[in-house]
Structures are given as structure tokens and as C-alpha cells.
Image (cartoon, rainbow, N blue to C red):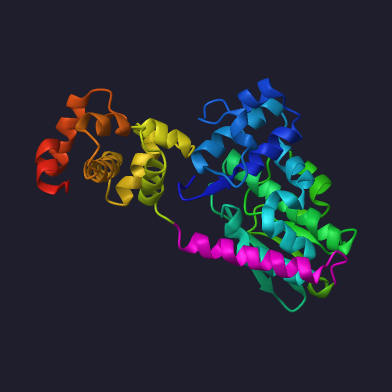
Amino acid sequence: MTNQVVFPTAYTRTLAREQGLDHKGQLLLLKGTRLSPADLLEFNKYIDAETQAVIVRNALQLSNNPVLGLRWGANLHLAAHGPLGTLIASSPTLGHAWKATEKFHDTRGGFARMEGHIASDHFAVIINMGIELDEVGRFFCEAVLATMVNHLGMIIGNSSPALRIELAYSAPAYAEQYPEFLHAPCLFGRPKTKIVIPHGLALMPNPMADPETHDMALARCEQLLLEQRHPRNWAARVTELLRSNPGQIWTCEQVASHFHLSSRTLMRYLRHEYTSYQTLRDSELARQAKLSLLVSNNSVESVALSLGYQEVSNFRRAFKRWFGISPQAFIASNRVN
């Protein structure tokens, strides 16, 4: 799975609820990750693809049910998709709903990309998975299909007999259960995965359409998409965390855990930005030390303790490494009494 793909924790939260897992069950669901059941209660959080893969494999093992992805997707409420779900639900027509999904899919993690295609007699939504189609990728592909068919049914009522599903992978052992959840003929081994509907249905009015709600949801989705296209890099995120927690000398493992990453993954992200955790931590500690030592009533000992150093001698050595002079020499040269 690609490391750029992330997943909202809302999906793991609803997956745990779908299986009716208690606290012990949630611990088993999260086994092998840095997450705890308490983390699932946080909103607007994301986890990396590696962590999500572990969770899905745990879920499949716990349920012992290969159609879990189809079942979960069919029962996934629009609210689980955040502002995008609200935008879909309030769209004036089915075509508008598809277009919203195509444009704003990245706001829900970007693991599945949608592409609308119009032909003379049909409209197709092509689903390009951003993750490998192993058991985890197929799980999410099935969930996406079941969710979209479910939302389609909300707009057009009972699924049209002309609706069909094409899948870009071989039929799994439980292929005969696909129509039960997708309510349409399912054709495997096709060039692309897509949902094909009669062309006229794209113009069908949405009975749940709400212009005011649609406008607010559209504005929020536009804002989220803009933020994602101009994201803060990992160096900025780490620096912000260190800066907002003065007096604590974080280890790389602690910072990685805060972002629900492994330390190895965080180090790789920072390496791609041509920096390292040690460099960022030293830079922030040096900044704080310099500012604190400029204050006339701060001693070297008090500054060391305020930064989180248990031994003042360790602070003195670190300061000389950062600036090439001792804290006392810095004070003598820079402090205004």
C-alpha cells in the first residue's frame, strides 16, 4: 500500500461498531498498531495505510466473514463521509452527486479515485483504487462499491435493472454474494472497476436535495480540498508539536506515536523533506534556549530545567553544540541588563 494514502479514523470506528466490538474486541481489532480504543473516539484524525492494513486484516480474522467489506459498506451511513457525505445527500441530482464524489474524494483520504464517464446510452463511475488489490484493497473496493450503490438507491429508489457492476479483478470465492449487497449483475475480470447506470438516471432529481445545506457543504469541501492541496509538511507538523509543548523533550518514538505513525515511517517522511527528527528537535530547543537566556532574570539552570533537561551539564553541552559557545558566554555577549 502506498504511504501517501491515509484513512479517516471514522472508518475504523464504524468498522468496530459494525462488528459490535466491546473494549476487549477493539483491542484485538487494533492489535499490532499504535492505536488504542480511546484514539477511535477522536474526530478528524487520519491513520496511515500501513496501520489501516493491519486493522482490516484483524477485522477479517475477528469476523471470519469474507464479505465483511460488502456488509460494512452497505451499512455505512453518509455521515461517516463527513462534509462530502452531506454534499452528496443534498445534491440536486444524481449527476451532481457523482460529480461531487469525483471532485472531493481526496477529502476522505484519497484511497479511491472516482472518474465519471458519459457515453451515448450510459453513465459510468470508474473507481481507481489507490492501494494494492490484495485482501485489504479488495475489502475497501467492495466497501466503496456497496456504499455508492446504497447512496444511489437513496436517490433513484429501487436499483434499475439496467445497473451493472464491472470489477477489475478475478472473482473471489464468495463472488456469488456480490449481487446480494450490490443489487446488480457483477462482472469480474474486466479492464476497470466501475458502476454503469442508464444515462437518463444522471438527471434524476434527488428527493433529499437541500440547496442551503448543499451550498454550505460545498464550501466546506472546497476549503478542505484547498488545505490538502497546500498541506503543511511533516517538518512543520513536528515543529508545531514541539513548540506547543515547551518543557518536554520528546523522543522520536513519542512524536511518531502522537501522529499514529511508527518512528521508522516518520523518519522516512522527514528524510524525504531533507531533514531529520534530531535536526528539528535541536533547532526548536536552540530557539527556546536562546530566547529564554535573553531574559535577564533567567539563570542557566532555570532555562535548562524549563526545557526539560534533568541535568544542567547536558544542557550546557547541547547549547555549545548549537551555537559554538557556552550559555554563560552567550549571556555575556547578548543579554541587556
Q: Nearer the viewer, residue 145 or 170?
A: 145
Question: Which image quarter: residue 174?
Answer: top right
Residue 53 in view here:
yes
Q: Is residue 25 above or below residue 175?
A: above
Q: Nearer the viewer, residue 137 or 231?
A: 231
Relative to 286, 329 lies left or right: left
Question: Which image quarter: residue 295?
Answer: top left
Residue for point 37% across, 44% down: 243
Residue for point 12% across, 36% down: 328
Q: Nearer the viewer, residue 44 or 74?
A: 44
Q: Is residue 211 above or below residue 160?
A: below
Q: Where residue 77 sits: x, y (%)?
A: 77, 48
Q: Where residue 122 sits: x, y (%)?
A: 76, 72
The magenta stretch is: 205-231
Task: Examine the structure image and report whether residue 226 is included in the region drawn in magenta.
Answer: yes
Q: Where residue 127 sits: x, y (%)?
A: 63, 59
